[in-house]
Image: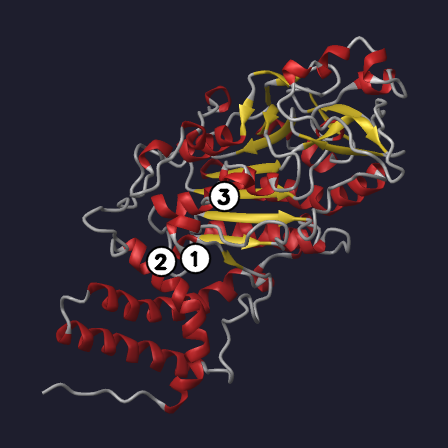
Amino acid sequence: MTTTIAPPPWLATRRQFLSGFAAIAAGAILHRDGYAREGQWSPPDGRPHFPPKAKSVIWLFMNGGLSHVESFDPKPMLTKYAGKTIQETPFADVQDPNKLAIQRLVAPDGNGLQRNTLFPLQVGFKKHGQSGIEVSDWFPHIARQIDRIAVIRSMWTTDSNHGAQTQFHSGRHSNDGLFPNLGAWVHYGLASLNDELPQYISFGYREYWNKRDGHYLGPAHDAVPLRVDPNNPLDFSQPERPLSTSARSVGINLIKQLNAQRAVESPEDAELSARIASYELAFRMQRSVPEAVDFSTETEETKRLYGLDLPHCREFGMQMLAARRLVERGVRFIQVQHGGGGAGAWDAHSALRTNHQNNALAVDQPIAALLEDLHRRGLLEETLVVFATEFGRTPGSQGADGRDHHIYGFSVWMAGGGIKGGVVHGATDEIGFHAVEHRHYVTDVHATILKQLGLDSRRLEIPGRKRLDIDHGQPINEIIA
């Protein structure tokens, strides 16, 4: 005779939590234990394809389009020929139609006029570190970390509007439809490092592009949105009435008993068993996630390092410190968006100097602190930090004091995780118009990240979804140590 275990009276108040967060945990369980199958096809077993150099990724994305020529790719010719049209300079051939896949050199200003004059650099550059790499004066803290960084100055993409945000994350133009993001593929391909925490986490607001990350891989591979708030890091993580520690313990023990009972009653129902097991996982996450974003154990020196005492960078600094704590606790992929909402905070069609100076103040110290802190703790060697944006900005002016979107050449950088430090790879021409040396599409960045994690993109497949060569990219081996 089967004994029925009556739930305690407070169990009903947990249903909102279980229906939200537990659904995510259920997907994680199904994925981890090999239950999410289609026919006879078997998903990845969670093991790397070859020995990895990195365990985790921290993906930093500057929404709106950071100017490459005012950050990590200085072009003094822009200042020398400022006010002249491109046709009046020695660089007129950059506008050769044969070189342009999409015609978006400049956009009309508010009066409908085309602005095609070169816009001078709005900031100075200095050489830094033993490598002597030039970095914009707007990023003095990152500049002091430059010997740990590999700058890629030869990126290109194809979407000249902010759908390029989606393109950089998924590798596909928005006109192609919706495809899984890189973080979702990592989550799909690798097993959990810590079953008490989500393995794909996102900080920051994303408005312009679809909030789903997994797409055809399924919602189990979507990022879990997190806030740096130990009292409520997840919107649906708290029950209607607070539960004591003892009540939570009773709940976990009850679920263990339910698991055992159900296993006897339905030994063949693997999916249902996995979903029941997910409740226990969800409660473990409910306890461990708030702890991960609780800074009460951090020293004051560490908090100052990240700029938590400075209003202009406190919010992003908290996200960077949380990212470090999550890496310490075994989270695979942490995605941090800066300037989300609308087209993105870095979208400087006008007032570029003010725009970029203020945005750089918000991110420069926290990002440098992240690199320094990871290094001090011996984590940088196994953590790959990626700094990216959807495209660069035009050499020519837009309006009086801005730059338009620019897809033909821009910069990203990587650090840690088996990447060489103090190197520059690739180049744009003299005015930053075209990537001309070692050109890389966005999926080359993806392939490099996957390689450092021990994954071969071409072995990450799902039935009924043919992936193209451009989806896979090629690792940028020149920057790999």
Whether residues under marks 1 and 2 lie with C-beta atoms below 8 angstroms apart, the answer is yes
Left or right: 345 as drawn, with respect to 481: right
The answer to whether residue 43 is above or below residue 248 is above
The mark nearer the N terminus, 1 or 3, is 3
The residue where tag 3 is placed is 177
Mark 2 vs mark 3, foreground winner is 3
Q: From the top left corner, tell me how far across and down residue 415 is, in percent.
A: 55, 33
Along the line of sight, the residue nearer the viewer: 184 or 386: 184
Label 1, label 2: how many angstroms apart (C-alpha)?
8 Å
Label 1, label 3: how many angstroms apart (C-alpha)?
27 Å
Query: Looking at the image, which residue sits at the far left?
Result: 1
Secondary structure type for disc 3? loop
Query: What amino acid is at disc 3?
Result: Gly
Residue 462 seen in the current view: yes
Q: Residue placed at 44% from the left, 33% from the top? A: 471
The mark nearer the N terminus, 2 or 3, is 2
The residue where tag 2 is placed is 28
